[in-house]
Image (tube, grey):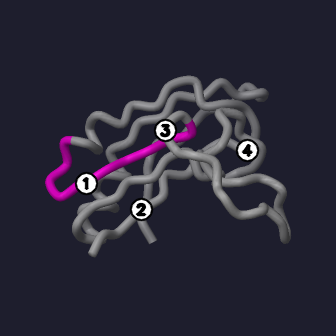
Amino acid sequence: MAYAALVTGVIARGKVATLELESARRTKGVLSYGDFEGVSPPSFRVGGASSLAPLQQQEIVHDGQIIALVVADTFEAACDGAERVIAGYASHYDIQFLRGAECR
């Protein structure tokens, strides 16, 4: 069995300028990881409340948007790997960023 943890953006509008996933890859138990450059488009039709498919664009259009995914052999390892992902942002606003992730 495998478990996944999501990495979400901390800005409401802008784009992901850099995404460092190497620390996540080196986390014990991590099996795989992906971001908007490495995840194939979904085969299902996006609908409902949003027209955005997760992990399909570098542009951030809402707070908490999924920017990466970490898969591991335990939930704890997936969360640990996700917390090690470092994202750099190009924001449309002049703001300060608080770094920190919390796996739920």
> Whole-Å distance between the Cαs marked 1 and 2?
12 Å
Image point (44%, 44%), residue name: 34
Which numbered disc, 1 or 2, marks the residue that appears first in the sequence?
2
Above or below — where is 73 with respect to 14? below
In the rendered image, the quadrant that contains the N terminus is bottom left
Which numbered disc, 3 or 1, marks the residue that appears first in the sequence?
1
Q: Secondary structure at mark 2?
A: strand
Q: Label 1 neighbourhood size at 10 Å, few (<14), some (14-19), many (20+)?
A: some
In the rendered image, the quadrant that contains the C terminus is bottom left
Above or below — where is 24 with respect to 22? below
Image point (67%, 30%), residue name: 15
Specify the label residue 12 is tagged with. 4
Which numbered disc, 1 or 4, marks the residue that appears first in the sequence?
4
Residue 48 position in % (x across, y down): 84, 71
Q: Nearer the viewer, mark 2 or mark 3?
A: 3
Above or below — where is 3 with respect to 86? below
Specify whether residue 32 is painted magenta. Answer: yes
Q: Label 2 neighbourhood size at 10 Å, few (<14), some (14-19), many (20+)?
A: many
> Whole-Å distance between the Cαs marked 3 and 1?
15 Å
- Look at label 3 and name its amino acid: Gly
Specify the label residue 38 is tagged with. 3
Q: Secondary structure at mark 3?
A: loop
